């Protein structure tokens, strides 16, 4: 196989197996973001690597359309690093495992449903322990930072990174960075030990604290260098992972032996490529409590309406899965599926019809749904928070008011509407059993990758197998519910709601999905169970 490193210098492809492989390779290379060499600034640390090309992704092409989107390695810019035997080979707990170490050539396919004539497609490097490691236990100084909003499972990931480093690799020096990215340069660190983290998985939130924004690359890498940190574990969403990518590039420019590893976090489950994000199962489970309360309230009143707003800025996965799990929901509204209020086939007409049929109904709405309608109604400004996320208007309050206004004009049909917003209850609880196990696997995959010398990557399951994924693949766009998929059709069948969409909208969605599949980035999480 031929390997090509993505860098800021010219790229040369020596050979390919066939023309189709070359085309596949060119299409992937076209998506590689190549940073320009950085010019030194006053007050900024210099190194022997200053101004040299920065490797952000490595593409490996093989036979039958095989493409490996590989992740950087410390030896890409520090070629003479020594290796050491993996201490796991002498660990009594792992001695019973057959072939515990991952083969160096193991990869994970992004798309597993193929035709006999299909190319092998995009693959990622399989996660797991390697026989050789690039860090000795005594030389490791690791740090952990959490950024962005809260999510169930944050404390579990912190705990399992600390315990995994200590138990599997004998690492004793682990620092906690408090308050997000700005904690690198604005606050003191705390020492994390097995004792201090032993029970934190039973609590919600993050013991390290968190914040949005505060990313200053130079100050952060200066702090990493001053403290002698050589493994950085960054837990956060797409904005946080973009920041991690920039930190990795600066570390590489300075020629530091520092592994930068991301653990993707978003309660909305909107991270591209990976099957799901941690905390999602817990969020769906907790959302059931709000839906159940709304159902009890609505059926206890004449013409009762229970309206529940769930999280989902740009992707409606929580609302969709919570609706499917509940079976008590009459209508689910998500950002991916436009709706309208007035007129024939509109939402208000459907609500009136359902109340006449059943005498009560439950509506679930994702927080990002109907934002265009609200903006038109309120003539709002386009405002963003410190992480760059667009500030959303409260669709729950707006929709409640619109429903009430509609039925005020129908005095013969009085309604009783109860609005429930469980947002902060859902995101602040501890992770459930399923997410606890998942967080452990994520933490261990991250540790194994860092010890094996990989850097500039994030971890996550791809079709059930944990893999190392280049930062740019999970930050280039967000995963969304495919409304032409069978899972959304199941929801429509469960709620018996109309799609509220015109034929043109449906056709446009189909075209977008076909284009998505053509670039080998088909959604793998909304497939049949």
Image: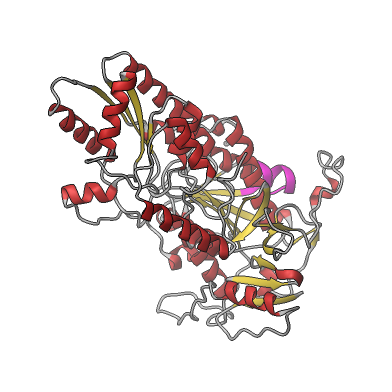
Residue 231 x, y percent position in the rendering: 61, 57
Q: Residue at x 25, y 55 (%)?
A: 383
In-front residue for pair 98/315: 315
Assign the N terminus to one quadrant of the image.
bottom right
Q: Quadrant of residue 518?
A: bottom right
Q: What are the residue bounds of the magenta stretch?
A: 163-173
Residue 139 shows up from this direction: no
Whether residue 329 sits left or right of residue 102 in the image: it is left
Q: Residue at x 57, y 82 (%)?
A: 52
Residue 249 x, y percent position in the rendering: 53, 70
Whether residue 507 sits left or right of residue 435 in the image: it is left
Whether residue 320 sits left or right of residue 446 in the image: it is left
Prevalent SS, magenta region:
helix
Residue 501 shows up from this direction: yes
Assign the C terminus to one quadrant of the image.
top right
Whether residue 447 sits left or right of residue 263 in the image: it is right
Residue 463 x, y percent position in the rendering: 66, 49
Residue 236 x, y percent position in the rendering: 49, 50
**55 to 221, vertically: above or below:** below
**198 to 15, vertically: above or below:** above
- Residue 168 lies in magenta, yes or no? yes
Q: Residue furthest top?
A: 300
In-front residue for pair 388/340: 340
């Amino acid at each position: 196989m031929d390997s090509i490193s993505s860098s800021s210098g010219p790229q040369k492809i020596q050979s390919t197996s066939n023309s189709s492989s070359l085309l596949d390779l060119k299409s992937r290379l076209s998506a590689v973001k190549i940073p320009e060499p950085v010019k030194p600034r006053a007050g900024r640390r210099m190194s022997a690597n200053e101004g040299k090309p920065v490797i952000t992704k490595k593409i490996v092409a093989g036979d039958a359309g095989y493409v490996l989107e590989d992740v950087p390695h410390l030896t890409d810019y520090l070629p003479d690093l020594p290796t050491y035997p993996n201490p796991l080979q002498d660990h009594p707990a792992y001695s019973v495992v057959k072939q515990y170490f991952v083969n160096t050539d193991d990869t994970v396919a992004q798309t597993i449903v193929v035709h006999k004539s299909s190319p092998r497609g995009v693959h990622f490097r399989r996660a797991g322990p390697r026989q050789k490691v690039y860090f000795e236990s005594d030389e490791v100084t690791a740090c952990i930072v959490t950024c962005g909003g809260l999510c169930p499972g944050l404390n579990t990931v912190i705990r399992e990174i600390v315990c995994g480093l200590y138990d599997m690799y004998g690492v004793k020096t682990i620092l906690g960075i408090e308050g997000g990215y700005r904690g690198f340069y604005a606050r003191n660190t705390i020492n994390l030990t097995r004792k201090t983290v032993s029970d934190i998985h039973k609590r919600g939130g993050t013991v390290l604290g968190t914040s949005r924004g505060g990313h200053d690359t130079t100050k952060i890498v200066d702090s990493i260098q001053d403290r002698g940190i050589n493994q950085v574990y960054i837990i956060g969403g797409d904005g946080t992972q973009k920041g991690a990518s920039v930190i990795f590039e600066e570390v590489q420019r300075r020629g530091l032996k520092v592994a930068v590893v991301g653990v993707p976090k978003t309660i909305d489950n909107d991270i591209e490529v990976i099957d799901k994000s941690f905390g999602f199962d817990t969020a769906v489970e907790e959302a059931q409590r709000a839906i159940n309360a709304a159902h009890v309230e609505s059926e206890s009143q004449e013409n009762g309406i229970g309206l529940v707003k769930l999280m989902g800025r740009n992707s409606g996965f929580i609302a969709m899965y919570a609706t499917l799990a509940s079976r008590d929901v009459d209508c689910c509204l998500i950002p991916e599926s436009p709706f309208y209020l007035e007129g024939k086939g509109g939402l208000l007409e459907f609500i009136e019809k359902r109340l006449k049929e059943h005498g009560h109904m439950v509506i679930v709405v994702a927080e990002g749904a109907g934002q265009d309608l609200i903006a038109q109604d309120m003539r709002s400004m386009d405002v963003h928070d410190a992480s760059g996320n667009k500030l959303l208007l409260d669709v729950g309050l707006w929709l409640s008011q619109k429903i009430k206004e509609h039925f005020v004009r129908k005095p013969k049909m009085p309604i009783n509407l109860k609005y429930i917003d469980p947002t902060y209850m859902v995101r602040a609880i501890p992770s459930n059993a399923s997410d606890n196990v998942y967080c452990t696997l994520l933490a261990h995959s991250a540790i194994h990758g860092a010890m094996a010398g990989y850097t500039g990557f994030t971890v996550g399951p791809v079709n059930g197998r944990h893999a190392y994924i280049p930062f740019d693949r999970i930050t280039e766009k967000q995963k969304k519910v495919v409304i032409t998929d069978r899972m959304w059709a199941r929801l429509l069948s469960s709620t018996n709601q109309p799609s509220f969409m015109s034929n043109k909208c449906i056709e446009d969605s189909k075209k977008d999905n076909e284009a998505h599949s053509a670039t080998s980035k088909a959604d793998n999480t909304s497939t049949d169970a």
